[in-house]
């Protein structure tokens, strides 16, 4: 009868530990045999019955060794080698230590390294040793704070877009500070504001040589010529027109309030209007004191324009209200309220966002198209078919370039197809569908009631796994109760098992070489019949009045004699 190769050998994973042990053992067994040649006609040759027996034997040893390394009942992922990191990479469960240096990088490029540097004096004597970490690539800090010496020195508020540098003393040494914006010390009302166009102290502009009104002006009057200064200590009464083509400065109590210079008229005081009066342009009032506490600002029949090309911003010191004055539409600090409605467009495109109201229970905001997070190419949220569609790209690094593959997930409600749906009423389900291959969660997934498979009776409840209503696994006190027949493809054993007379535990195992099934127990009790086609006895003890001692025996039939 020819010898057959064990069927599991062809199915071995060539990257597995079991295959590595099997291959090494077989080559050692084969090479230790006498090779077949003219002088040794009965020697071994690859593929004959002897080589097949050696393969089966090597597989038996390799399977046992690999099983011991992986641990009883495991699939090869744990055991004795659980705490070691593979040379090809993997995950560690223990602490990583590198007390004598460490380097890390990606794509064969060093990005991070530890270093030690000795510092010597002029005579070459080492006076100090510096230990540190050196970065040769970009550093991206995912948090919002940077600590130096145990102190939070730098903090960034992403919502407000504000970075805060905090230290008792900030010494810039000989550094040059350049800013195209503003510098603010304290608050704007009582502090100091420095910008490229002005300097304010306590909310008031500081005048200097560049913007002060220097009055070295000669006065020239009709019928009189003043070569130098003209000082009038008393009152002056002019009966005719006053012509001052080289500049005018008017004021009161020794203070200049109105000056004329070039094309500019400067007012250094308050311009007061009585009720119903103001400023007219072309005969049309554009600024009118409508009441004692109201000012009306208008145009000449066209649009009212605020700001020019030279105006960087318009600042509100008071809020903007609606016509009735009941709603503050825009506050000085950006709080907005639009009681009528709200519509948002981009570059005169279609409506992107608007408000709606049916009644007090149904009102809100409508996103007409896309809602992206982070940037214009970021995570996409869109309403579709009464549900919510989420889209984002998946990045792959291929051939020194990044390939982006868009993926879409849809969330909504539909009629339930669960076999456990209530039969006395309609039933609905919240469903998630995606064109990705899997849905993965990074934290434990918990549910009230049960976790099941749609359209199937399989479900998991507290302490019970239902495969059908009749077939299930149920947790009981100190064990598991099986409902239905049990079929085992592999071995069945206690947690710890060793064979032989001095062994421990129990097991029902299949011999991978012969295919025979062996059951090992400490004691077997048969309440009725005990049948065996072949009975091999190592030791027999008979009590209750009889003694039977036999080195070897076999019986075809046992009959009780009264």
Image: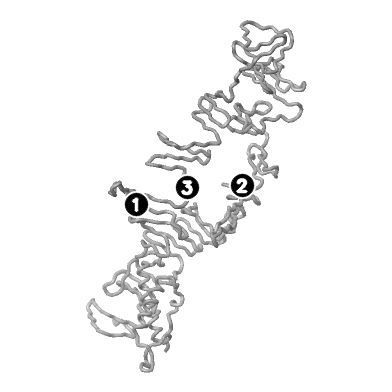
Q: Which residue is mark 1?
A: 116
Q: Given this view, does label 3 or label 2 mark the residue nearer the observer?
A: 3
From the viewer's perspective, is 544 left or right of 436?
Answer: left
Circle nearer the N terminus (3, 2)? 3
Circle nearer the N terminus (3, 1)? 1
Alpha carbon separation for disc pair 3 and 1:
28 Å
For disc 1, the neighbor class at 10 Å (few under 14, some 14 to 19, many from 20) is few
- Element under disc 1: strand
Q: Quadrant of residue 402?
A: bottom right
- Element under disc 3: loop
Q: Which residue is mark 3?
A: 142
For disc 3, the neighbor class at 10 Å (few under 14, some 14 to 19, many from 20) is few
Quarter containing the C terminus:
bottom left
Mark identifier at residue 61: none
* x, y percent for residue 517: 38, 77
Mark identifier at residue 371: 2
Residue located at (75% from left, 29% from top): 302
Q: Given this view, does label 1 or label 2 mark the residue nearer the observer?
A: 1
* x, y percent for residue 135: 43, 51
Circle nearer the N terminus (1, 2)? 1
């Amino acid at each position: 009868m020819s010898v057959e190769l064990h069927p599991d050998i062809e199915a071995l994973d060539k990257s597995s530990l079991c295959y590595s042990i099997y291959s090494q053992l077989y080559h050692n067994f084969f090479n230790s045999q006498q090779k077949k040649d003219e002088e040794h006609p009965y020697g071994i040759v690859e593929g004959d019955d002897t080589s097949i027996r050696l393969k089966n034997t090597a597989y038996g040893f390799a399977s046992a060794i690999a099983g011991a390394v992986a641990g009883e009942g495991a699939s090869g992922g744990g055991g004795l080698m659980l705490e070691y990191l593979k040379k090809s990479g993997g995950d560690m469960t223990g602490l990583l230590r590198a007390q004598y240096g460490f380097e890390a990088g990606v794509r064969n490029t060093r990005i991070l390294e530890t270093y030690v540097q000795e510092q010597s004096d002029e005579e070459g004597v080492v006076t100090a040793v510096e230990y540190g970490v050196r970065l040769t690539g970009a550093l991206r800090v995912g948090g919002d704070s940077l600590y130096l010496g145990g102190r939070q020195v730098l903090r960034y508020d992403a919502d407000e877009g504000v970075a805060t540098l905090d230290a008792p003393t900030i010494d810039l040494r000989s550094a040059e500070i350049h800013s195209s914006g503003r510098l603010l010390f304290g608050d704007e009302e009582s502090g100091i504001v420095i910008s490229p166009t002005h300097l304010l102290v306590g909310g008031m502009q500081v005048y200097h040589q560049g913007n002060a009104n220097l009055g070295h002006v000669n006065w020239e009057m009709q019928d009189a010529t003043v070569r130098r200064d003209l000082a009038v200590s008393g009152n002056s009464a002019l009966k005719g027109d006053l012509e001052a083509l080289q500049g005018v400065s008017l004021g009161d109590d020794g203070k200049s309030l109105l000056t004329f210079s070039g094309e500019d008229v400067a007012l250094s005081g308050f311009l007061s209007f009585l009720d119903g009066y103001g400023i007219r342009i072309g005969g049309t009032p554009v600024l009118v004191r409508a009441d004692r506490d109201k000012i009306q600002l208008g145009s000449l029949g066209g649009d009212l324009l605020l700001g020019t090309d030279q105006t960087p911003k318009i600042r509100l010191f008071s809020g903007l209200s609606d016509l009735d004055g009941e709603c503050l539409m825009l506050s000085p600090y950006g709080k907005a309220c639009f009681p009528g409605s709200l519509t948002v467009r981009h570059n005169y495109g279609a409506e992107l966002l608007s408000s709606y109201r049916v009644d007090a229970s149904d009102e809100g905001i409508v996103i007409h198209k896309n809602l992206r997070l982070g940037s214009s190419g970021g995570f996409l949220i869109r309403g579709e078919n009464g549900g919510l569609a989420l889209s984002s790209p998946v990045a792959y690094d291929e051939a020194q370039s990044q390939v982006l593959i868009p993926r879409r997930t849809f969330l909504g409600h539909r009629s339930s197809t669960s076999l456990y749906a209530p039969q006395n009423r309609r039933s609905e389900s919240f469903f998630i569908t995606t064109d990705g291959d899997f849905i993965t969660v990074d934290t434990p997934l918990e549910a009230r009631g049960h976790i099941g498979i749609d359209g199937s009776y399989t479900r998991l409840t507290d302490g019970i796994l239902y495969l059908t209503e009749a077939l299930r696994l149920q947790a009981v006190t100190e064990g598991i109760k099986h409902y239905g027949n049990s079929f085992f493809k592999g071995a069945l054993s206690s947690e710890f098992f060793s064979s032989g007379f001095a062994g421990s535990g129990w097991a029902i195992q299949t011999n991978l070489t012969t295919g025979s099934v062996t059951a090992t127990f400490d004691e077997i009790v048969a309440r009725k019949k005990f049948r065996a086609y072949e009975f091999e006895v190592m030791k027999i003890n008979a009590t209750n009045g009889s003694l039977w001692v036999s080195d070897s025996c076999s019986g075809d039939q046992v009959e009780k004699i009264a």
